[in-house]
């Protein structure tokens, strides 16, 4: 009878572990962009420290809004914490993926370093609209893990060719106006 009870308990434990892995913990947090005091074309937002329990799997979503065409960069990092002897990893979050979605649905992914503790993405000339950054991963430390991050947004600077074409167009309009006035 004890063997059946132990088998049933083991099966229940395995089922709950599989359910935890299949249904990761998730948060959705808005990132509010704040203008930089020294450079009005630059805004930023900070991702608060995300605390994770041991073996916790996460799917986290960070949302933000762009008012105009902008260049966007995002990075997140986990600082590994070892015990006093430096031989036991106490806290670390390991990233599995990073993706950006926006007005046109899936925009693309970013990069994750070889150890999985740093991730980033960067996009140029994103149009105005609502965007979401999705981070997935898990806590790999004996006591769990944590991570934090930053979002930077810069107003897109026009390409030199676009600027030259705009100035040429203004010159043509001015020339036509001058000809019309002289006639």
Image: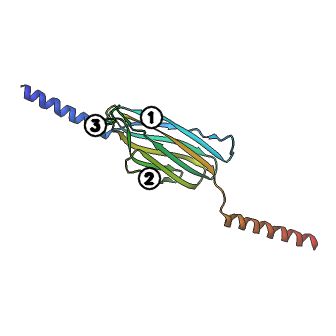
Horizontal and vertical percent position of residue 120: 48, 49
Q: Are the two marked residues, 3 and 1, in contact with CB atoms closer than 8 angstroms? A: no
Q: SS class of the residue under badge 2?
A: strand
- Front residue of this view, candidates 141 and 156: 141
Residue displayed at 9% across by 29% down:
4
Horizontal and vertical percent position of residue 156: 64, 54
Residue displayed at 65% across by 41% down:
35
Please name which of the two marks, 3 or 2, marks the residue nearer to the observer.
2
Q: Earlier in the sequence, mark 3 or mark 1?
A: 3
Reading the image, the residue beneath label 3 is 19
Mark 3 Cα shell of 10 Å, populated few (<14), some (14-19), many (≥20): few
Reading the image, the residue beneath label 2 is 111
* Quadrant housing residue 3: top left
158, above or below 64, in the image: below
Horizontal and vertical percent position of residue 18: 26, 38
Left or right of 152 on screen, residue 18: left
Quadrant occupied by the N terminus? top left
115, above or below 140, in the image: below
Q: SS class of the residue under badge 1?
A: strand
Left or right of 159 on screen, residue 62: left
- Mark 2 and mark 1: Cα distance apart in space: 20 Å
Mark 1 Cα shell of 10 Å, populated few (<14), some (14-19), many (≥20): some
* Quadrant housing residue 183: bottom right
In the image as oriented, which residue stretches furthest toward the left? 1
72, above or below 91, in the image: below
Please name which of the two marks, 3 or 1, marks the residue nearer to the observer.
1
- Mark 3 and mark 1: Cα distance apart in space: 22 Å
Number of numbered labels in the structure image: 3
Reading the image, the residue beneath label 1 is 50
Q: SS class of the residue under badge 3?
A: helix
């Amino acid at each position: 009878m004890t063997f059946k009870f132990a088998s049933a308990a083991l099966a229940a434990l395995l089922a709950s572990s599989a359910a935890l892995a299949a249904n990761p913990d998730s948060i959705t947090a808005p990132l509010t962009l704040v203008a930089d005091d020294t450079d009005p074309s630059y805004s930023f937002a900070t991702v608060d420290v995300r605390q994770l329990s041991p073996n916790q799997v996460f799917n986290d979503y960070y949302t933000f809004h762009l008012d105009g065409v902008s260049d966007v960069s995002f990075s997140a990092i986990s600082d590994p914490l070892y015990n006093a002897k430096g031989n036991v990893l106490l806290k670390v979050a390991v990233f599995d993926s990073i993706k950006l979605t926006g007005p046109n649905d899936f925009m693309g992914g970013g990069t994750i370093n070889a150890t999985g503790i740093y991730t980033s993405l960067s996009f140029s000339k994103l149009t105005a609209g609502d965007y979401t950054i999705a981070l997935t991963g898990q806590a790999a430390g004996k006591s769990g893990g944590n991570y934090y991050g930053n979002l930077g947004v810069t107003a897109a600077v026009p390409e030199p060719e676009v600027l030259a074409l705009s100035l040429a167009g203004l010159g043509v309009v001015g020339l036509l106006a001058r000809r019309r006035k002289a006639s």
